[in-house]
Amino acid sequence: MVDVLNRFGHLQTPPAGPFRFIAVDVETAGNAIESICQIGLCFVSDDRTMQTYSVLIDPEGPFAPFNSDLHGISARTVIGAQTFPEVYAALFRLLDTHHLVQHSRFDERAFAAACTRYGLPKLTSHWTNSVTIARQAWPSLKGAGGHGLANLKKHLGLQFHHHDAGEDARASASVILSAEPILGTQLSYLTTNRQLTFEFEFRSAE
């Protein structure tokens, strides 16, 4: 089996929280938006430390050649991987209690569609679109390559491997952290929930 999960050195288990925000990215097996085959998360702390986690998922459906060529994940790659309900159950509380960041609204819609497919509760988290933040910070990129991750990679000198969920999640988090000094302020709604800090510390002590 091709080791897509570890080829970029991502964490195999999510780190302990709480965090300032979590950036989210998904890769899909085909045209169906609910066909998630990889989830990537980047956990951002108050000191701007980023920790990247990724997990492969068996989409329980076929892979389109175009998608596999894009992200390198195929039916063979996900042999033995967990399904979305199994992975989602392990991540739900962490995701549902944090501010989430995505680059475009694709990831939010993919999660919602996968939850509908399997009859699972949907996330109630607040989602921030880093494309919107990038447009505010670098308006000159409109008409000059745009605000997609590939162009932002060149403009900002970001180091990541595009079309890997963990790498793209880290890139999305990096866009936010790079934009804030340009905007002259930290995004006030992307802050660590202090009550959540207490809850995590209390649970860790049990």
Image: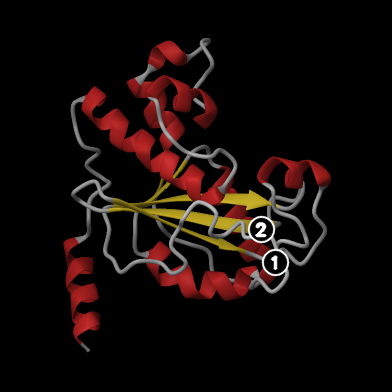
Q: Of the two numbered discs 2 and 1 on the same chain, state the one appearing first in sequence.
A: 2
Residue under the image location 35 percent in, 64 percent down: 97
- Which amino acid, by three-letter code, is at mark 2? Cys
Residue annotated with mark 1: 58
Picture disc at residue 124: none
Q: Secondary structure at mark 1?
A: loop
Q: Could you say where residue 51 lies in the image, as x and y percent from the top left? A: 35, 55
Q: Is residue 9 above or below residue 58?
A: above
Q: Is residue 42 left or right of residue 46?
A: right
Q: Quarter-wise, where is residue 199 in the image?
A: bottom left
Distance of label 2 from label 1 (alpha carbons): 6 Å
Residue under the image location 34 percent in, 59 percent down: 98
Residue under the image location 22 percent in, 56 percent down: 192
Q: Secondary structure at mark 2?
A: strand
Nearer to the camera, 109 or 147:
147
- Say if mark 2 contacts mark 1, CB within 8 Å: yes
Nearer to the camera, 163 or 203:
163
Picture disc at residue 37: 2
Q: Is residue 153 left or right of residue 204?
A: right
Q: Could you say where residue 92 lies in the image, as x and y percent from the top left? A: 46, 69
Quarter of the rendering occupied by the N terminus: bottom right
Q: Is residue 139 above or below residue 69?
A: above
